[in-house]
């Protein structure tokens, strides 16, 4: 693995629209923390958000600029970002979203010495010239083999395979320890809050309130299990969120129509997802569109909990490697209920994680930084 020369301190500026929540935001904080722990200087530019306090507490500097706001006024941030880059003289500018990448690309003009430019493609963005800015990085990081294939298929003239690095997201095995179980106090409080979830195997589908996450498929799964005389409960974790009231009402109507009012709960986002996953008999990942990765998959498996999901995109890729028993063809309702019944009867053993760990992701990213700064290929 490439390392920076002893005594050589890197300065890395990461660019992201905001720091509220999400996979890209979490990865930003994780790399920022790793940089600080390795003795480097970490700066993040964004419009701000609830994660700024954590970022700064972990030793990084945050600079507030609305570089991700889709407005003509955002162009005025180019000059401000250029002044920041001239001030801090970064070795690397790392953009994690399309508009911040454009702002960073323009801001680097006239900055000497010119920083190295990194990009990360976090999602399956619609192919376009606007999205192609993410192909201009000296290193283009993608979070899965699925995403690498997607990038090479849609941008054959913009990026060559040699510049693409697959660096999967990772699970913090300290935060999600193998075999963890929540204590009795937490369990009592949980089932007092959601009494309808007690007394039967619990299936949990985590995901925001959008139909892309497959909530309806999960509800139909509970109904199909009931028809087979298999009693199970369902938690739609995080689906009840502001601005999604009409969609949640639609889900509640489906639940009522299937006679499942006493078997299904729709909850807001919770901070204790580790405990919820650990209490679940199966964690579901039923997105009806392919996702670039599936952090839920690796978090649940790290806890030694079975995962069942559709075999496409990054989720299918992870399940094929880590838990093949949980793979189901996309949209196959019959296979879904059959596989759920099998896993509830007997789930294949899950070994402790040996890949997709947070430390692996951090080390691989810092090695790529060192490779371009030092000009020495990573081992």
Image (cartoon, rainbow, N blue to C red):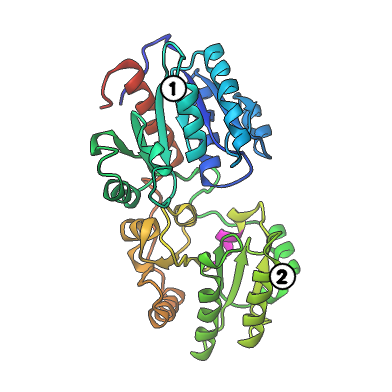
Query: Residue at left 51%, top 48%?
Result: 177
Place residue 343 in its image quadrant: bottom left
Identify the magenta region: 276-280
Q: Residue furthest front?
A: 72
* Residue 198 visible, this angle: no
Query: Can you say whether 41 is above or below 202 in the image?
Result: above
Q: Quadrant of the N terminus?
A: top left
Q: Is residue 326 left or right of residue 14?
A: left
The C terminus, quarter of image: top left
Q: Is 104 within the magenta?
A: no
Local SS, label 2? loop
Instruction: Give the quadrant of residue 291.
Output: bottom left
The x, y position of residue 169, in whole percent, is 43, 44
Q: Nearer the viewer, mark 2 or mark 1?
A: 1
320 vs 79, nearest the viewer: 79
Vertical comparison of 105 with 72: above or below: above
> Dot 1 corresponds to which residue?
92
**Nearest to N terminus: mark 2 or mark 1:** 1
Tell me what residue is drawn at x 40 percent, y 49 percent: 353
The residue at the far top in this view is 7
In the rendered view, tell whether residue 151 sits above or below residue 286. above
The alpha-carbon separation of the residues under discs 2 and 1 comes to 48 Å
Decide which of 267, 155 is in the foreground and name it: 155
Counting other residues with Cα less than 10 Å from the Cα at mark 2, is it few (<14), some (14-19), or many (20 or more)? some
Say which residue label 2 marks. 194
Residue 326 visible in the snapshot = yes
């Amino acid at each position: 693995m490439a390392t920076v020369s002893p005594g050589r301190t890197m300065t890395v500026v990461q660019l992201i629209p905001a720091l509220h929540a999400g996979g890209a935001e979490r990865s930003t904080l994780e790399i920022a923390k790793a940089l600080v722990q390795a003795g480097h200087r970490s700066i993040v530019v964004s419009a701000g958000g609830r994660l700024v306090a954590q970022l700064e507490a972990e030793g990084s500097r945050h600079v507030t600029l609305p570089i991700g706001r889709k407005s003509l006024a955002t162009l005025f941030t180019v000059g401000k970002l250029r002044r920041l880059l001239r001030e801090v003289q970064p070795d690397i500018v790392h953009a994690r979203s399309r508009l911040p990448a454009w702002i960073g690309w323009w801001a680097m003009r006239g900055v000497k010495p010119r920083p190295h430019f990194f990009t990360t493609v976090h999602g399956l963005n619609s192919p376009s010239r606007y999205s192609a800015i993410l192909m201009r990085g000296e290193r283009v990081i993608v979070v899965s083999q699925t995403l690498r294939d997607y990038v090479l298929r849609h941008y054959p003239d913009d990026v060559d395979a040699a510049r693409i690095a697959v660096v999967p997201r990772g699970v913090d095995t300290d935060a999600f320890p193998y075999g963890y179980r929540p204590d009795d106090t937490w369990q009592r409080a949980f089932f007092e809050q959601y009494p309808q979830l007690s007394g039967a195997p619990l299936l949990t589908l985590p995901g925001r309130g959008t139909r892309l996450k497959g909530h309806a498929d999960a509800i139909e799964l509970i109904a199909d299990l009931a028809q087979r005389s298999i009693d199970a409960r369902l938690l739609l974790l995080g689906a009840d969120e502001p601005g999604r009231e009409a969609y949640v009402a639609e889900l509640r109507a489906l639940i009522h129509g299937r006679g499942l009012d006493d078997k299904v709960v729709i909850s807001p986002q919770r901070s204790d997802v580790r405990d919820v996953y650990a209490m679940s008999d199966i964690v579901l990942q039923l997105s009806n569109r392919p996702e670039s990765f599936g952090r839920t998959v690796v978090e649940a498996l790290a806890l030694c909990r079975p995962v069942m999901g559709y075999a496409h995109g990054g989720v299918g890729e992870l399940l094929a490697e880590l838990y093949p028993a949980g793979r189901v063809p996309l949209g196959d309702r019959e296979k879904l209920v059959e596989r759920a019944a099998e896993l509830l009867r007997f789930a294949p053993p899950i070994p402790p994680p040996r890949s997709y760990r947070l430390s692996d992701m951090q080390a691989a990213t810092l090695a790529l930084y060192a490779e371009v700064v030092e000009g020495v290929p990573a081992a």
